[in-house]
């Protein structure tokens, strides 16, 4: 017996009277407990009224929830939906109440700062999931479609289209096509360009869900006219999802040669297309190109999966030569060399380009320093920490001084382990140099001396 089931049995053994008294005592000190009791003892009809009353109460709220209270407010909204889930069994009633929750978005977002995105996530995930749970068993599918369209006539906060995006999870294709026809009529009558595009965007979502790539393409063209690179990729993606591989490929070919915008998304589609076409030659060329443009264990793995892992040593050896010949420092190349166990080469690569180390890239440089320190490569580790420290001092970024002090203390410690400084300044000479340049930054040096 698990701990949870054991406790449950002990509570049952206490009897209904003891549990009722305990709940009532708890409710005196907890609004959530009091609310739970009201939910448990109310009839289904009364619980529906409680939900509506709580939703209406938000409209009359005079409080404003700043970003610090947003997560708590999100939990409050989650509990409101959870209450609905536990007390309403009728599918259509549930759908109508969840749609009412979406229609309260103006009120909800006006009384809170949702810069964290927590409130929006309640609509995108919790409310959407509950809506689908109610809509799936509901027999009147056209009614569900009408409700979704009604909610989406306006969408001031860009959150209501969540219900459009999940239409195929609860509606058959024929009903979705009636929704598309309605939206098209709205778009045709709309004089405001923004409003028209809103309706057309909803049609795009529905067209993609029913895998009608031709309709998706026509709608995108009607919405924007001249197609951007992003639009070409979107159209190709929908054709691919619809099973029209060759047409998908033809749309990707319309992208101008040398275009870098959304290159990753384009290449992922091309990779899938070449796989489906069985074009191993073009697939290999693409994966080689991706690997050479960004060396990583992931791009290497993708390439080897196609050309065979028995070619790993040859591919790696060739690419290491290319990396070491390059003049420009790329932290990602150093990370790649370390990830494949080429520590000597990584050290040589970084030492040869030490003057290019830029402490502003502290995220990647810090991980490189830590990796090289583990391998006892103290000289190159010191050079990386120097660049991080200099960046902080040159910017005079006082909030980062504790990090700078830690880097300098690290440099003091590493210096005792460096036997050969090569052409680089010894630690004391480097230290003297930064004192001359930044000695007036007393808030830094006073803390360093104290902590030393």
Image (cartoon, rainbow, N blue to C red):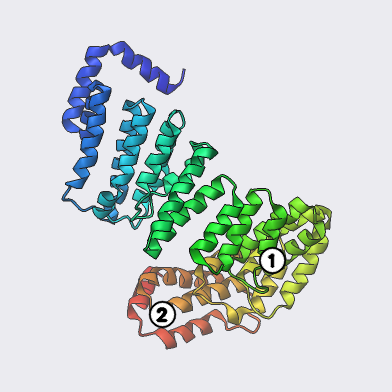
* Location of residue 443 with respect to 376 vertically, above or below: below
Q: Foreground residue, 194 or 318?
A: 194
Q: Earlier in the sequence, mark 1 or mark 2?
A: 1
Secondary structure at badge 1 equals: loop
Residue bearing mark 1: 253
Q: Position of residue 83 (x, y in %)?
A: 31, 32
Query: Callout 1: few (<14), some (14-19), or many (20+) C-alpha neighbours within 10 Å?
Result: some
- Mark identifier at residue 425: none
Q: Could you say which quadrant of the image residue 381 lies in?
A: bottom right
Residue drawn at 20 percent across, 36 percent down: 53
Query: Which residue lies most toward the bottom here?
Result: 436
* Location of residue 126 with respect to 333 vertically, above or below: above
Q: Is residue 317 left or right of residue 123?
A: right
Calculate the distance from the C-alpha at mark 1 to the C-alpha at mark 2. Answer: 46 Å
- Count every numbered label the image shows and give the total: 2
Asked if residue 117 can be seen in this view, the reply is yes
Residue bearing mark 2: 395
Residue drawn at 37 percent across, 30 percent down: 92
Q: Foreground residue, 256 or 443?
A: 256
Q: Position of residue 330 (x, y in %)?
A: 63, 73
Secondary structure at badge 2 equals: helix
């Amino acid at each position: 017996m698990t701990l949870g089931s054991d406790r449950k049995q002990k509570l049952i053994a206490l009897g209904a009277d003891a549990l009722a008294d305990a709940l009532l005592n708890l409710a005196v000190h907890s609004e959530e407990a009091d609310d739970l009791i009201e939910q448990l003892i109310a009839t289904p009809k009364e619980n529906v009224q409680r939900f509506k009353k709580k939703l209406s109460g938000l409209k009359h709220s005079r409080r404003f929830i700043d970003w610090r209270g947003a997560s708590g407010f999100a939990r409050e909204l989650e509990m409101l939906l959870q209450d609905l889930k536990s007390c309403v069994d009728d599918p259509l009633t549930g759908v109508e109440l969840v749609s009412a929750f979406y229609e309260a978005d103006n009120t909800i977002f006006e009384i809170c700062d949702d810069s964290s995105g927590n409130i929006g996530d309640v609509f995108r995930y919790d409310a959407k999931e509950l809506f689908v749970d109610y809509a799936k068993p509901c027999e009147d599918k056209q009614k569900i479609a009408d409700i979704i369209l009604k909610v989406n006539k306006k969408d001031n906060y860009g959150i209501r289209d969540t219900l459009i995006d999940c239409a195929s999870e609860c509606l058959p294709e024929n009903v979705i096509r009636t929704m598309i026809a309605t939206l098209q009529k709205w778009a045709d009558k709309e004089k405001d360009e923004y409003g028209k595009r809103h309706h057309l965007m909803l049609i795009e979502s529905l067209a993609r869900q029913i895998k009608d790539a031709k309709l998706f393409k026509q709608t995108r063209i009607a919405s924007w006219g001249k197609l951007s690179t992003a639009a070409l990729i979107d159209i190709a993606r929908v054709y691919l999802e619809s099973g029209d591989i060759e047409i998908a490929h033809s749309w990707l070919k319309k992208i101008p040669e040398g275009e870098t915008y959304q290159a990753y998304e384009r290449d992922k589609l091309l990779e899938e297309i070449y796989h489906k076409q069985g074009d191993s030659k073009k697939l290999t060329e693409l994966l080689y190109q991706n690997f050479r443009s960004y060396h990583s264990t992931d791009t290497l793995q993708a390439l080897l999966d196609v050309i065979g892992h028995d070619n790993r040593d040859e591919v790696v050896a060739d690419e290491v030569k290319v990396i070491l010949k390059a003049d420009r420092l790329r932290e990602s190349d150093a990370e790649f060399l370390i990830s494949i166990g080429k520590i000597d080469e990584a050290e040589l690569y970084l030492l040869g380009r030490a003057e290019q180390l830029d402490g502003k890239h502290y995220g990647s440089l810090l991980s490189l320093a830590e990796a090289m320190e583990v391998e006892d490569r103290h000289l190159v580790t010191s050079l990386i920490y120097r660049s991080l420290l200099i960046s902080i001092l040159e910017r005079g970024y006082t909030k980062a001084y504790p990090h700078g002090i830690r880097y300098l203390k690290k440099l003091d410690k590493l210096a005792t382990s460096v036997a050969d400084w090569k052409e680089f300044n010894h630690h004391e000479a480097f230290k003297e140099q930064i004192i001359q340049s930044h000695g007036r930054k007393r808030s830094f040096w006073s803390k360093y001396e104290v902590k030393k």
